[in-house]
Amino acid sequence: MIDPNLLRNNLEQVVANLGMRGVKVDIEKLRHLEEQRKEFQVKTQSLQNRRNTLSKEIGQAKAKKNEQEATLLLEQVEKVAIDLDVIEKEFEKIHEELTQYLATLPNLLHESVPMGKDETANVEVRKWGSPKQFDFPVKDHVDLTADNNHIDFEAATKMSGSRFVVLKGEVAKLHRALAQFMLTVHTQDHGYQEMYVPYLVEEQALYGTGQLPNLYDDLFHIKGDRKLALIPTAEVSLTNLVRDSILASTELPLKFVSHSPCFRSEAGSYGKDTKGMIRQHQFDKVELVQIVTPENSYAALEELTRHAETILQRLELPYRVLALCSGDIGFAAAKTYDLEVWLPSQQKYREISSCSNTESFQARRLQARFRPTSNAKPELVHTLNGSGLAVGRTLIAVLENYQDKDGNVHVPQALYPFMGDTKIIRLIK
């Protein structure tokens, strides 16, 4: 959530920043609610002060054994209490309405974010590796695995409908190996703590990381006695680990990694990437989360992005890094880098990771704080997240980039320790 003090003191600056995203702020509504909030806050404080003064006077009257004066003062206190109850309820109502409106506003953009209306304005930051030149017709991951049905969409459709998949045999083994490889690199080489987290979370957890209220339709909600939803990413569970907490500065940075399934309804994406595994309702991801002090958060963003890149480099998969423009960046992010891996069948780069700094936007919702020094006032932490990587899309990239003319897939050397004796996946009967 945006800092309310910025909205009160620098409203024009906030409106201009959000305008870069194409977001229009209802200025009149915001000002009206803020004026009402101030009015009821002043009335509340005035009545509270009046009640406290009368309470002291009652004590003084009783000390003088003036019961008549004490009784009259007590009647005034009771009247003030009635008025205060009415005002407090009105104040809470206005405060809740203001909070609900602020919850619909995305994060402010960092000054380095490029301007643009959509993904065509994203800026390429760097490339790594060169796409392989094949001397035979390249197959996509669907056609490549069709002969032995190693990727079985029909079986998944029978039990779950479209946009689900069943992986079989050595392709399933490769999928598992990729996740294990990612976890090993991030824990052993990059210093992340591996976590196993819930896949079902309450609405408050989703509100804390910014999925609610705006992305309600993109979630799978569970019917039952409790309002639970399946996580769209382990970012939700990992970031909520610091909710309602005050950390010591010596505890930071915190670096978490988790392998989990992710569940997304993909509302509004029908007709996009309908062939294959690019866009699924259920997919696996290795998620990276860092909790840091504000002064270190942009250095942490560069570090986290490099950690995700390391996976692609060790798998020797060509990729590029993009800085997302103002019109393409996510709701909670102040700045985002996308990693896009080369897919030979499409002759283009496709997204495989997003790495974002949300600054204090999530932390304010979560009330995640730290003390700079032992006696200092708590401050909000900064939270960052990124895919390190999306396992299914990495699987696609390996299958397509490591295929040969006979329809086999050669396992990347980095995966040898995780694939047993399998170095070649033979996909043709």
Image: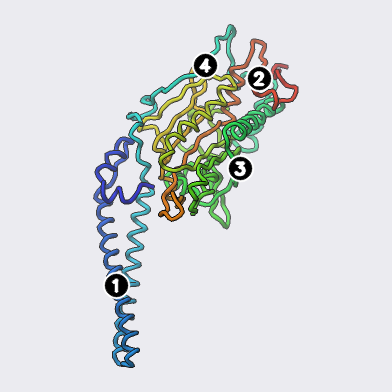
Q: Amino acid at mark 2?
A: Gln
Question: Label 4 near label 1: C-beta < 8 Å?
Answer: no
Q: Circle 2 sits in a helix, a strand or a loop, which is it?
A: helix
Left or right of 75: which side holds 349?
right
Q: Residue at x 31, y 36 (%)?
A: 22
How far, Cα to Cα, is label 4 from label 3?
32 Å
Give amino acid for label 3: Met
Residue that label 3 marks = 195
Residue underneath mark 1: 47
Image coords of residue 183 (percent x, y): 62, 34
- Of labels 1 and 4, earlier in sequence is 1
Q: Could you give the CA–CA distance between mark 1 and mark 4, rounded to whole angstroms?
A: 69 Å
Q: Earlier in the sequence, mark 1 or mark 2?
A: 1
- Regarding mark 4 in the picture, which secondary structure is present there? loop
Residue 204 visible from this viewpoint: no
Q: Which residue is drawn at the image coordinates 58% and 13% (left, top)?
A: 138
Residue 218 x/y as whole percent: 48, 41
Residue wearing tag 4? 129
Is 156 drawn above or below residue 226 in the view shown?
Answer: above
Label 4 crowd (10 A; few <14 / some 14-19 / many >=20): few
Q: Earlier in the sequence, mark 3 or mark 2?
A: 3
Of the residues shown, which amino acid type is indicated by label 4?
Gly
**What residue lies at 29% left-to-right and 44% top-to-bottom?**
25
Q: Quadrant of residue 38?
A: bottom left
The residue that label 2 is drawn on is 413
Q: Which x, y percent locates residue 198? A: 60, 47
* Quarter of the view holding residue 32: bottom left
> Mark 3 and mark 4 in contact (Cβ < 8 Å)?
no
Question: Which of the 4 quarters of the picture holds residue 75?
Answer: bottom left
Question: What is the crowding at mark 3: few (fewer than 14 residues within 10 Å), some, or many (at least 20)?
Answer: some
**Res 41 visible:** yes
